[in-house]
Image: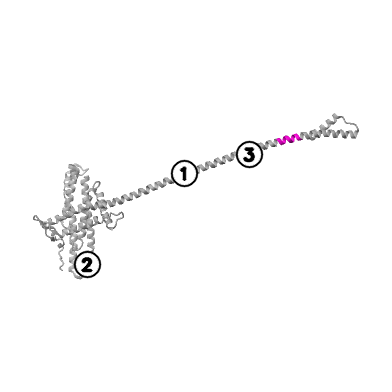
Amino acid sequence: MPQLDVSTFSAQLFWLAVWFVILYVLMAKIGLPRIAVAIEARRQRREDDLARAQRLKSEAEAVSADFQRTMSAARAEAQAVIKEASDRLAAEAAERQRALTTALAEQIETAERRIAASKDQALTEMRGIAIDVGQSVVEKLTGSPPNAAKLTAAVDSVLAGQLR
Amino acid sequence: MAIELHPLHQFEIQRIIPLHIGGIDISYTNSALLMTIAVGLIVALTVFGTRKAALVPGRWQSLAEMSYEFVADIIDTNAGHGARQYLPFVFSLFMFILFANLLGLVPWSFTVTSHLVVTFALAAVVFIGVTIIGIVRHGWHFLRLFVPEGVPPVLLVLLVPIEILSYFIRPFTLSIRLFANMLAGHTMLAIFGGFAASVGLLAIFPLGINIALVGLELLVAVLQAYVFAILTCLYLRDALHLH
C-alpha cells in the first residue's frame, strides 16, 4: 500500500507545507480581503441606497404635510373672509331695512296726521256751509231767519250722527 | 499502452523531479504537482477572479464570493463569536481539501488527500493550532474543557478520562475520515474500472456502476471538505468558548 511507504512522507509533507503556506498567505493577504471589500462595498451601497430612499421618502412626506397645512390654513382663511363679508353684508342689509322701516313709519305717520288735519278742516268747513245752507233754506221757506242757536245745534247733532 | 489494473497503483507517489536536501527527500512528486494545480486554481479564482471587484459580480467573482460566504457561514454558525479572524485558515483548508478531492477525480490524476500523511498533517495543524489558541485564551481554565458541566462528581471520575481521550483522538478521526473516504472511493472506482477492462462487451455493467460511483465520489469530495471545515470550526469553538 503506497500510503504506508514512509520514504515518500518527507517529500509529501515538504510540498504540502510549501503550498499550504503559499495558499494561506495569498488568501489572507490578497484573496479574502479583496472578496470582503467587494461584498462590503455592495452591502454599503445597498444600505446607502436604502437610507437615501428613506430620506427622500421622509422629505416628500414633510413637503406633503407642509402642503396640507398651508392648504388647510388657506381654506380656513378663505372661510373666515367669506364669513366676515357675509356678516357685514347681513348687518348692512338689516341696518338699511331698519332705516327704511323707520322712514316709512315716519312718512305714514305724517301722512296720517295730514289726513286727520284735512278731515278736521273739511268737517269744520262743512259745518259752516251746512249752517249757511240751513239758514238760507229756512229764510227762503219761512221768510224769516231761523234761530241761529237752534240751527247750529241741529247741524251739530246731524254732523255728530253722520260722523259716528 | 498497458493499463495498470492494480487498484492501489493510482496511489503511488511518482518522483517527477528528484530533490534531496541534507539527505532529506523533498522530490517534486505527482502529489506536489496536484497540490500546485489545486493552489493555482484557488488563487486564480480568488485573486484573479476578483481583480475588478465589481459591484455586480461576474461569474468568477460570484463563485469566489459564494465560497467566501459559504466558509464564513460555516465559521459563524459553528465556531461562534470571535472566530472570524480564523477565516483565512479555514478558507484555505476547505478550498485546499475541496480542490484536492475534486482534482483527484480527474482520470489519471492523483488524489493528494488519499494519503494519510497529508490528511494527518492537516489535522495535526488544526489540532495543535486549536490547542494553542485555547491555552492562550484561557490558560489553566482550558482544562475545564475536559470537565463536563452539571455532572455528579462521582461520574466525573469516569467522564474526564473519556473527554481527554476524545480530545486527543481528534486529529486521528479527522485525518482518517478524509483519507479513508478518498482511499475507499478511488479504490472502488479502480476495481470496477479494472473489472470493466477485463470482461469485454460485458464492461457496460461495471462501467455503469462506475458512472454512478463518480457521481457519488463528487458528492463525497465536496462533503468531506465540508466536514473537515465544520469539525475544524467546532474544535475552534471549544477552544474559544470552552463549552
Name the element at disc 1: helix
**Residue B205: assigned label:** 2
Residue B129 rendering spot, x and y as whole percentages:
18, 48
> Which x, y percent locates residue B212?
23, 63
> Residue B47, located in which quarter of the rendered image?
bottom left
- Where are the magenta residues, as a range? A110-118
- The N terminus of chain B is located in which quarter? bottom left
Q: CA distance from mark 3 to mark 1?
A: 40 Å
Q: Which mark is residue A25?
A: none
Pointer 3 with pointer 1, Cβ within 8 A: no
Q: Amino acid at mark 2?
A: Phe
**Residue with the most extreme right position:** A143
Residue beneath the point at 18% across and 68% down: B197
Instruction: Residue at the far top: name it.
Output: A149
Question: Which of the 4 image quarters holds residue A110?
Answer: top right
Q: Nearer the viewer, residue A153 or B47?
A: B47
Residue type beneath disc 1: Thr
Q: In the drawing, does residue B169 fall left or right of residue B65?
A: left
* Circle nearer the N terminus (3, 1): 1
